[in-house]
Image (cartoon, rainbow, N blue to C red):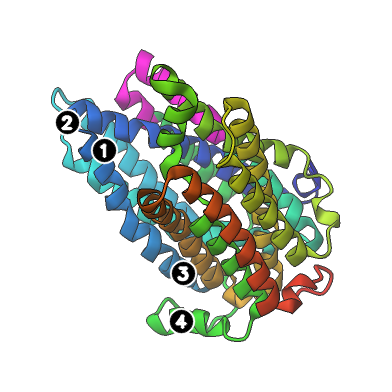
Amino acid sequence: MDLTPLRVSRDFRSLFIAQSVSYFGDAIVAVVVPYQVYKITGSTLAVGMLGLVALVPVFVFPIIGGAAADALERRRMIVTTHAVLAAMSVLMALNAAQATPLLWPLYAFTFLSAGLYTFDRPALDTWPARLLEPELLPSSNALEAGFGTFVSMLGPLVAGVVLATAGVSAAFVLDACTFAIAIVMVLRMRPSPPASEDNEVSWEAIKDGFRFLRGKRNVQSVFLADLNSMTFGWPMALMPAVALTLGGQAHQEQVLGLLFAAPAAGAFLTTLFSGRAKDIRRQGRAILLASVVWGGAIAAFGLVHTVWAALLLLAVASAGDMVSGIYRMSILQSAVPDAYRGRLGGIAMATWATGPSLGEVESGVVASLTSVPVAIVSGGLITIAGVAAIRWYAPEFWRYDAKRPTP
């Protein structure tokens, strides 16, 4: 892993620590909230409704947040949103400390925290482009993605220990503390004013962000590559059925846990060996080839009949997606002018949040009409065909040169 971005930029170090600590708190809360809802209601439907509550803000808020990132001073914006999130976690801790905790605050918390999280993500995701030279952006993205996957594995373990030893209220207090640490680190950074005084948070500014995409086939291809992979090659909704087939009734739960852990492990290992990422100039080509690896591994996953082979293929698939993700973000950071980065980052966030949801629907429908293996294999093969279609639609994306970034 290339640690150069952490060495050369004090502001990037502060931002990296702030995001890493904040992600750790997010990973804890992702376990605590559904746990408490189930403890209060005893209903899996009530837990499932949390996803529905978060759906609208996850799609809408990033686009508004992108306009805000281009129009507002970023440091003040991030400090404000994190302070609100910390206050919300404190309120949830007080609710959990009651003899009979209320249910509705958990849904309100899910809605508001998902909205605020996706609101400030465009600013956070595109901020490194102001702090680092373009050739270091792949390395910075690998660093952030690597720690993100690490805390996604560590956070649930810590959440389990805290819930077992100190309770739900303590877990929310811990989350509030992570936001406080993140605020301190962001305050250590220099102010980051908007690139243009003409930028504003308005409907016209949002539309201007979408208008920027016209004719920009390199940026369009970044979005298309992600939608293609996630819509057709995202079989996570079928994992319970796969676990039953591979592990039988007696071992279904254990196999299911391994199936969900394998992609995170593959992505994390990829970031550990990402030191040469900054040396790749043909980043569009890397995205498309990595998408082929994703689609091919998913198609093969649908054909295997042993647990170890399934885990290996899921790890390989996720490794391909991680490589694609590193360069997708790098192109958005380097090829998009600073005045538009926030808005394009918001559109990207909405796209990346929508793709897996569409993928779960697609795989579920195809499996119900055919079979689970057919749904998985066909999805992987369609993903590869989609890569060929993007290559035909945007030949300049295949030739994209990181030394001369163009949208």
Whether pointer 4 and pointer 1 mark residues with C-beta atoms closer than 8 Å, the reply is no
Residue under the point 64% across and 72% down? 389
Report the Cα–Cα distance between label 1 and label 2: 9 Å
**Residue at numbered disc 3:** 68
Looking at the rendered structure, the kind of residue marked 4 is Ala
- Residue lying furthest left: 100
Local packing at callout 2 (Cα closer than 10 Å; few below 14, some 14-19, many 20+) is few
Relative to 257, residue 68 above or below:
below
Q: Quadrant of residue 248?
A: top left
**Residue at numbered disc 4:** 205
Q: Position of residue 201 (x, y in %)?
A: 42, 76
On residue 41, which mark appears? Answer: 2
Report the Cα–Cα distance between label 2 and label 4: 43 Å
On residue 47, which mark appears? Answer: 1
380 and 215: which is toward the camera: 380
* Res 195 visible: no
Range of residues picked out in magenta: 151-173
Q: Position of residue 264 (x, y in %)?
A: 58, 37
Whether pointer 1 and pointer 2 mark residues with C-beta atoms closer than 8 Å, the reply is yes
From the image, state whether disc 2 or disc 3 is nearer to you.
2
